Image (cartoon, helix red, strand yellow):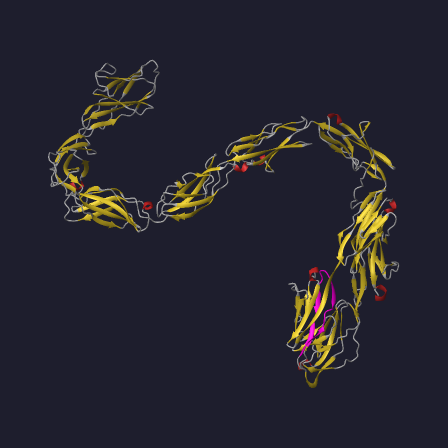
Amino acid sequence: MKILSKNSPALPQEDTLHGPIFTQEPYDITYSMGSADPEILLNCTAKGYPLPYYRWKQNGTDIDLTMSYHYRLVGGSLAINNPHKKQDIGTYQCLATNSFGTILSRKAKLQFAYLEKFETKTRSTVSVREGQGVVLLCGPPSHYGDLSYAWIFNNNPLYVQEDSRRFVSQETGNLYIAKVEPSDVGNYTCIVTNTKAEQRVQGPPTPLLLRNDGVMGEYEPKIEVRFPETTYAAKGSSVKLECFALGNPVPSISWKRSDGNPLARKIKHYKAKGVLEIPDVQQEDEGSYECIAGNIRGRNVARGQLFIYELPEWDKKIQNAYLSLYDSLFWECKASGKPNPSYSWLKNGHSLMPEERIQIENGTLSITMLNVSDSGLYQCVAENKYDTIYANAELRVIASAPDFSKTPVKKMSVVQVGGEVTIGCKPNASPRAVINWKKGTEVLRQNKRITMLADGSLKIYNITKSDAGVYTCIATNQFGIARNSGNLIVKERTVITVPPSSMDVTVGESIVLPCQVSHDPSIEVVFAWSFNGDVIDFKRGVHHFERIGGESVGDLMIRNIQLNHSGKYMCTVQTTIDSQSATADIIVRGPPGPPEDVRVEHISSTTALLCWKPGADNNSPIQIYSIQTRTPFSVGWQAVSTVPEVLNGRTYRATVVGLNPWVEYEFRVVAGNIIGIGEPSRPSELLRTKASIPVVAPTNVSGGGGSRSELVITWESVPEELQNGEGFGYIIMFRPLGSTSWTKAVVASVEACKYVYRNESIIPLSPFEVKVGVYNNEGEGTLSSISIVYSGEDEPQIAPAGASAQSISASEIEVSWNSIAWNRHTGRVLGYEVLYWTDDSKETTAGKVRVSGNITAKNITGLKANTVYFATIRAYNTAGTGPSSTPVNITTKKSPPSQPPANIAWKLTNSKICLNWEHVKTMENESEVLGYKILYRQNRQSKTHVLETNNTSAELLVPFEEDYIIEIRTVSDGGDGSSSEEIRIPKISSKFFPPALTLKIILQEACAPLKGTIAK
C-alpha cells in the first residue's frame, strides 16, 4: 500500500534563513516647530537572515532617500533633517525586505505643534449689572496641539482663582463668572499655553465694567458650559466633562448617570464640581451623564452621551508555515476592537486579492495547490476608525527529495508477545513521499494484523515471535527515493501469576500481600506498591510496610496493621517495555473509636440521664456500650449501673443509677465490638448530683476511758462522698444501760469522730447504750446500731505483792510478782507496768515495760553486765497507774569471754573433719568458760548447724559437695562469747558418701571416739 508523508521540515531557528521580523516600529510623533533639535527620527528595526534592507513611504508614496540633505537612514530608522511642516506632515510606513519578501510596519503620523499670536486688535468693554452673569471670550489663535488656558486680572501675575463663582473652560478658554460682584471690575487677559510647541501667548485685555442702571435680581441657573452631547473616549484613557452655569444666587453643580446607576467610586471632581473626571475608562462607564445646576430660583440640566471605543487588539495571530509543494494553506487571524475591525491581507507589502486558488474571507486566507511562487511574507491587517494593526508570518513552500537524516526510523523497537507496535516513518519530503514497507526482502501488505497508517507509520497488532526482524521504510517522490531501517525485537510477556487478594483483617495483625510474576528472563522487572494512589517509598523507612521476595517476587508485608491502613493496594510490575498491575482491597477492623458528644440531659440526687453519639465503628459494628464515672473521691474511672442494664450498639441514651447525692461526677462512654473495647469518649461536663438526707450511719461506734465522771464516745467519720449535702453533722444518743430515756447531743463538725459527756453523777465504769446518727440541711438521717460504752474509771488502788527478780545473763533479768484480785472499788486492772533502774540513777529516769492481761512475769533485756538493778511493779487501767510494789534488786551476771578461740587447726580425711583449738582464758570481770559452740554451714546455704562441746576438739562427718564455713565461740553464764574468724573447708568428691550429716564430739585427743551431744 502506498501513502503520502505529511511531514514538514522543522521550524527555523534564529540562526537559520528567515524573512524580516520587526523588533521596533515607528509611532506617532508631534514635532514642535520651535524645537532646537533640527532632526526627527522615526524608528524602525527588523531582524532577518539575510539581513533586511529598508524603504519608507509617506502618505502611501515611496520616499526618495537619495535626497540626502533632507532624508537619511539610521539603520532602518528614518531621519528627517530640518523638517518642514508643509513638506513633511503626513503618515509614514517602514518596509523591511530580504530574499524571503517584504513586510510593512504600522502607520505613524507626523504632526507639527505650533501656536500663533493673538491679533493685536483692542477688545470691546463688557458692561454688566451687579449680580448678573458674564462670559469673557478667549478666542485662541491658530494652533496645533493641546492647549491649556488661564486668565489674569489687572496684570496681576497670579492667575484668576477658580471657585463656585468663576470657571475657566479648558475646551474653549472662556472665563465664566456666575454672578458679578463690584470687586470683579477690571481688565481680564487670556493666557494660552501649548506644551507640545513649548509656547505661551497672551491675548489683549478685555475690560469689565458695572452698569449703573441697577442690580440684577435673582434668576434661575443658565448652563453656559456644556459637555458635548456625544463624547468618544478610548478604553483605558481619562475623560473630563465640563459643566458651569450662570445664576443668582451662584448655582451649585451636581452630577449623576441618567440610567440611575451610581457614579463609579473612581470618579473625581474638580473646580467646585465643574469638572467630572473618569479615569481609566472601561466599557461599564459608557452611558448618559447629567449635570444639574441649581439655586433657590430653579434648576437646569445638561445631558450628554459617553461612548467608549477600543483600538484593535490581536486575539489570534498567524504563524509561520513551512509546507510542501501542492499542500494547502489555511490562516486565520482574529482581532477585537470597538467598532469591530475589518480585515485585509498583504503579501510582500502589496494587497492580496482573491483569485482561483486564493480565498479571502474576513480574517481567513486559504491557498490550495501551493507552488513555490506562493512563498513570501504575508500580513493580516485589522483596522477600525481609530487604529490599524499588523500580524506577520512567512509562508515557505518547499520542494525536495525524501530525506531521513533528521527523522530516521527508530533503530530498535522492543515489544512483547501479544502486544502491538507502531514503527514511525516520517521523512522530510516535498511534495509528500509515497511510503512502502519491507520486512527483510519481503514487501509488506496490509492484513488483519498489519496496517499502514496515513502518516506513513507501520502498525502491527497481536505480535508473535515470528514478527521479529528488520523493517525498512521506502519513501519516493518525483525528486528521488530514500530508505531507512529499524530492528523489531519480540520479548515474552510479563504476567502477574500470583496477584494480591482482598483481605479482611484485625488491627494489630501482620499480613503479606503476594505479587509474583513470570517474565522474559532478559528483561529486568521492578516492583512498586501504592496505597490509595500514593506510592510507598520503602527507601524512607516507612513504618509497618516492608518489601519481601526476590527477583520475580515483590510481596508486601504489613506489620502490626492499623486502622488507617484500610484501603486499596496496587502492585505494579514495571519493565522497560510494559507495565502490569493488580489491586486488592484491605479492610482493617478494630475496636470502635470513642463515642462523641457525651452530654448529661438531666441529673437528680442518685441518677443521671446521658446521651451520646456513636463514634467510628472501625469496620466492625458496635455491639455494646458501657458508662463510667469519676468523682474527686474515686480512684480513676469506675463502671456504673444503668437502666437499661445492657446497652446494645443501637442505644444512645441511658440512665445511670446508684449515684451518691451532692457529689461532682464526670461521665464517659466506652464502645465495644467483636474485636474489643475501644477508646473512651471525652468526659462530659462536671456536674453535681442534687442533695439528699444522709443514709449512711457512722461505723465502729465505741469509746470508754477518759477521766472520772466522763463518758467518751468515738466513731468513724462518714466520708465526704456519703454526706449527701451541705450542713453535715453528727447526732449522739446515749443512756445508762437499763434506762428508757435518751440524752441527745449534736456535733456540727463534718470531721468530728469523738464526743465527751461530763457529769459528776456518772458512776465510774458504768455501762451506757450509745448510738450515733447523721444529718445535713435536708434533714436527719440514719442512726447506728446500739453499742455498749463504759464511763471513765479510777486508777488501781492496790500495789502488786510477791515481787522477785532473777539474773538470766549479763544483759537480761526476769522480774515476777503476784496478780491482784480487783473489783470495781479497788480499780480495774488491765495489766502491769515494770519500772527498773540502777543504783546510781533516779526512779524518774527508770526504764519502763508493760504487760497486758494477767501476765505476772517479764524479762528485761539490754542491761549492763555485773550491775545491780532495782525493779518495782504497778497495775494500770484506762485512768492511769496505781501504787508501786516494794522495790527488789538483782545483779546481772559478768560479761561473756571477750577473747575468741585461737590457734584453730583442722584436718580433712575423706568426709571427716578433725578440729583442735586452744582453751580460752577469761579476765577477772568475765564469766567462766563453760564450753564451746561449733557453728557450720554449707557455703551457699543460710541454715547454720550448731554442735556444743566441753572439750577443745571435735570431729565432723559431713558430705562435702560444697565448701563448708565453720566458726567456734565460747559458752558462759554471761552468754556466748566472741566467735573465731570463719574457716573455709574446700569441697571434695562425695558421690561415695551417704548424704546424712554425722557429728561426733571428741573427749580425748583430736579425732578419737568421744562422748558428747549433737545439736540438731
Instruction: Where is residue 955? Give x, y as percent.
Output: 26, 17
Of all residues, the one furthest to the top in this rendering is 992
Would residue 580 be counted in the magenta stretch?
no
The correct choice, above or below, for 934 with respect to 404 in the image is above
The residue that appears at 33% across and 18% down in the rendered structure is 960
Instruction: Where is residue 199? Give x, y as percent.
Output: 76, 70
Provide the major secondary structure of the magenta segment. Answer: strand
Residue 26 seen anywhere in this rendered image of the structure:
no
Residue 384 left/right relative to 536: right
Residue 937 left/right relative to 53: left
Of all residues, the one furthest to the front in this rendering is 644
Q: Nearer the viewer, residue 622 or 890?
A: 622
The correct choice, above or below, for 226 with respect to 898 in the image is below
Instruction: Where is residue 17? Give x, y as percent.
Output: 82, 46
Which of the 4 quarters of the picture holds residue 234?
A: bottom right
Residue 438 left/right relative to 162: right
Residue 290 left/right relative to 857: right
What's the magenta region? 219-246
The correct choice, above or below, for 813 with respect to 430 in the image is above
Instruction: Where is residue 24? Give x, y as percent.
Output: 78, 55
Of all residues, the one furthest to the bottom in this rendering is 213
- State the quadrant of the C terminus: top left
- State the quadrant of the N terminus: top right
The correct choice, above or below, for 1000 with respect to 467 in the image is above
